[in-house]
Amino acid sequence: MGKPYISTNSIEQLRILRATEPEAVLRVKNLNVKAGDHHILKNINLEIPKNRITVLLGPSGCGKTTLLKCLNKLTDLYRELKVSGNIYIDNDDILNTTASIPDIRQKMGLLSQRPYPLPISIYKNVAYGLKLKGVRDKKLIAFSVEKHLREVGLWEEVKNRLNSPASSLSIGQQQRLCLARGLAVKPSIILADEPTSALDPTSSKIIENLFRDIKKHYTIILVTHVLRQAIRLADHVIFMDDGEIIEEGSPVELFENARTDKLRAYLVDGN
Amino acid sequence: MLEEKFFIRLSALFTYSLIAVLAFIIIVIFYKGFAALNWDMVFKTPRGGYYYGGEGGVLNAITGSLYISIGATLIAVLIGMPAALYLNVQLIRYRRTQNTIRYFLDALWGIPSIVYGAFGFTLMLFFGMNASLLAGIITVALLISPIMVRTFDEVLCTIPKGMHEASLALGSTRTETAFRIMFKQGFPGFITAVLLSFGRGIGDAASVLFTAGYTDNIPVTLDEPAATLPLAIFFQLGSPIPEVRDRAFAASIILTIIILFISIGARLLSKRYSKTNLK
């Protein structure tokens, strides 16, 4: 390999992190997704560590987004997708459970490539999930809205216009609002599908810093094409290609000592 | 470069030609009908010999048209909204079924209104009904329902799938997503759809010819016949008396003004409700 992708200091910190490996919060076993003859995900087996940022890397079309959609059962929207295998969250297999799908989805906050604020006010966007959960206490909702808007650093910017349409915010603010909205329903996992790809560098940096701050309380699965972002954020890396997991491990293992030609080629191209 | 200039000018020519045709229609209607337009025309029903130049107005046709088109639009909204939401939310996984339903709705949209009139007339006879306001409302509702569903459907298709997924990911059911999010995001477009359908309903003569009948009175109950503006225009234009033909143009002005007011109202409402929507 050529020059190192991450500093020696960072490598040391990552080794310490690795030594205190947390328990897995999400386990995927023999996950297969097919669309007709096309095998999108091939026998995926993985474990996502708790309170860490797991980065999914891989070329476009390798199945990263499909994997995320399997995790919160959004694949149900696509009849052509046949999903088989097991996905365990808190030891509950969500692919073979009788639990309600909305309840399963509330365990996972979703942050998509571009923000989709709901066509309601800023306040109602954050309160939406709480109301779905059956929370009716207005004081509790107001408290939660403020707490989560503060958590994503948006409170000071919007506190005087909470009743304004969410669409009036800048795209970076909208993405933070979507994060606050997701956090309000108390998920244990955050699925982030290239959440900064539509944002300017400043807004991207804010989102990255947020991820670093909130990983104490949440497990984050991040899909990104930005290698430098992966290096900055990842505690655990999964490299996929053509529907398969090619390599998995700590950033040091993958970025410094890539074992496969595919990953080496990807890192060279990405760098 | 020359080619581009040519096509730009050609496109501009066609665009402004269409606007000129519309302006020309309005000018002709006003030119021929303005002199015959008076308060009596709007606020009085026809007296004896009105269609031979006697006194009175077309209040019967104005009210009849409004009753029929408002009633039919309400029924079509009640049918069309759940149908469009079902098509786009519940059937989201069944693309082939979606496309088949869309194909049938498009075919229904293309059927001439006289066929709806004949169908309504057959239904009327089957149920032993006479030409009435109710029969007119039902027939016009059948006529405009496919237009309403397909226009609602097109509006819902423009809503980003990501918004749908975002709502589901927060833990809402498909029905909650349909009524709380999709409906809200599509609302400005729905207003346009309602306007389109209302315009088609109020302006159609063939579907109400056999079903609503025609009368000089304002209907008080649903089983009474009802006059409509398009038929009033039709009957008056067929008169050999020039004065009566001018009244047909005056009635056309009234019909145009009704549609204009509804159009302006719909635009204002649409603008107001689109403020919260994601562009």
Image (cartoon, rainbow, N blue to C red):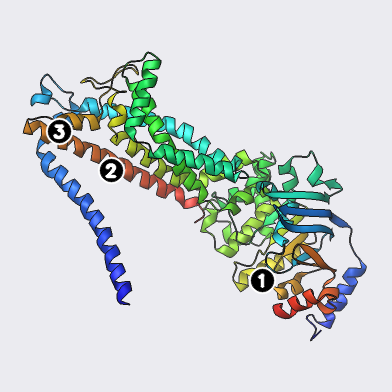
Q: Which disc is residue A205 wearing? A: 1
Q: Are marks 3 and 1 on the same chain?
A: no
Q: Residue furthest right?
A: A19
| Left or right: A168 as drawn, with respect to A232 | left
- Compared with B54, A219 (above or below) is below
Q: Chain of mark 3?
A: B
- Compared with B238, A16 (above or below) is below
Cα–Cα span, label 2 and label 3: 23 Å
Query: Amino acid type of disc 3?
Result: Leu
- Circle 3: is it few (<14), some (14-19), or many (20+) Cα within 10 Å? some
The residue positioned 33% from the left and 33% from the top of the image is: B113
- Compared with A79, B58 (above or below) is above
The residue positioned 63% from the left and 56% from the top of the image is: A178
Query: Amino acid type of disc 1?
Result: Lys
Q: Residue furthest bottom?
A: A3
The residue positioned 21% from the left and 52% from the top of the image is: B21
Query: Amino acid type of disc 2?
Result: Leu
- Residue bearing mark 2: B260
User: Which of the 4 image quadrants contains residue A224?
Assistant: bottom right
Relative depth, front residue between B174 and A90: B174
Q: Chain of mark 1?
A: A
Q: Chain of mark 2?
A: B
| Left or right: B164 as drawn, with respect to B257 | right
**Which x, y percent locates residue A218?**
78, 57
Which of marks 3 and 2 precedes in the sequence?
3
- Residue bearing mark 3: B237
Q: Are marks 1 and 2 on the same chain?
A: no
User: Which of the 4 image quadrants contains residue A53?
Assistant: bottom right
Look at the image and tell me in which quarter the N terminus of chain A lies: bottom right
**Which x, y percent locates residue A104?**
75, 45
Label 1 vs label 2, nearer the camera? 2
